[in-house]
Amino acid sequence: MKQAVGVIGLGLMGEVLATRLMAAGFGVLGYDVDPAKNAKLATLGGKAAASPAGVAGCSVIALAVFNTDQVEEVTEQMLLPNVKPGTVVLCTSTCDPDRIEALGQRLAGSSIRFLETPVSGTSEQVRAGDGVGLIGGDPNTAGDVKGVLDALFPRRYHIGKAGDGGRAKLAVNLILGLNRMALAEGLTFAERMGLDPKAFLAVAQGSASQSQVMGTKGPKMLARDFAPEGRVKQTLKDVHMMLDQAEQLGQELPMLRVHCDVLESCVRAGDAERDNSIIVEEIRRRRR
């Protein structure tokens, strides 16, 4: 077995990262605030720590927590006082890029070498090795942990400094979210016009409108299978960050505001924990 890699946050994405690491021959020492997730890691072949500080002995630690606040708290308050010099912390969460850039600057010269590594793709795409890593930070640090990055993100791009990976992720997710919205509207429109939705999806995939989203989310929309691969609440969190960035830049994003409204309606309907493909249900509800 190769070295043990730490994973803090064992939700949808964290669990997938842990399983990819173990499949590549790494040990995994993980932690989540939910005891059930720690227990599940043990059944998968990893080991659970009692706290984030318990993961600090690993020379490489991946963070898969919910938001920027948690990344800052775990990194500076729980890991920084306990890690060995030279420890590499990989931030796989989608975060506020300005705050991540500032965090990277604060950690410069400390015992932590900080690398931003958000991933584009659903948890199932990442599980299959089809996620795309968006790397921000020192290229030398990325080179030093190439084996870990190869296990997590066989396809990846080095975008620039810390913060730039998150900026690319937000822009990618903006396009991705609008593709989901277009698919939800198109399927609903076709169905209301009397077309068979399954047959229409196949036609759309063979047409000029084809997108990767049709393959990942189209079948879920048709089957009303909203088991989460990317939760509504996570998508909405990212959309709010996009709008905050656009506000700072003086950029209007009119289609994104419609997407935000639809996601917020889904949350009000009780769908925050369900897959973001459930936006099709909100489109179906919006009738004159």
Image: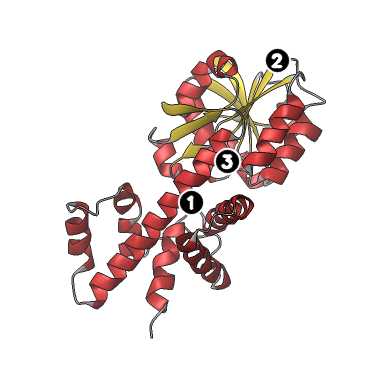
Give the x, y percent position of residue 88.
65, 21
Q: Is residue 134 left or right of residue 81?
A: left
Task: Give the CA separation, mark 1 to mark 2.
Answer: 33 Å
As drawn, the label of residue 169 is none
Q: Nearer the viewer, residue 235 or 278?
A: 235
Q: Nearer the viewer, residue 249 or 218?
A: 249
Residue position marked by numbered label 3 in the rendering: 40
Give the x, y percent position of residue 244.
62, 54
The quadrant of the image that shows the C terminus is: bottom left
Disc nearest the viewer among 2 and 3? 2
Residue position marked by numbered label 2 in the rendering: 86
Measuring 43% from the left and 37% from the top, which residue is drawn there? 126
Q: Nearer the viewer, residue 220 or 193?
A: 193
Q: Is residue 57 left or right of residue 275?
A: right
**Amino acid type, label 2:** Gly
Residue 229 visible to the viewer: no
Q: Residues within 10 Å of mark 3 (few under 14, many from 20)?
A: some
**Amino acid type, label 1:** Gly
Most distant residue in the front direction: 250
**Amino acid type, label 3:** Lys
**Badge 1 or badge 3: first in the primary sequence:** 3
Instruction: Check disc 1 and report its element: helix, strand or loop.
Output: loop
* Picture layout, residue 22 above or below residue 195: above
Residue 105 visible to the viewer: yes
Task: Give the CA separation, mark 2 to mark 3.
Answer: 30 Å
Q: Residues within 10 Å of mark 1 (few under 14, many from 20)?
A: many
Residue position marked by numbered label 1 in the rendering: 230
Give the x, y percent position of residue 137.
60, 25
Which quadrant of the figure has residue 41? Answer: top right
Measuring 35% from the left and 55% from the top, which residue is drawn there? 217
**Badge 1 or badge 2: first in the primary sequence:** 2
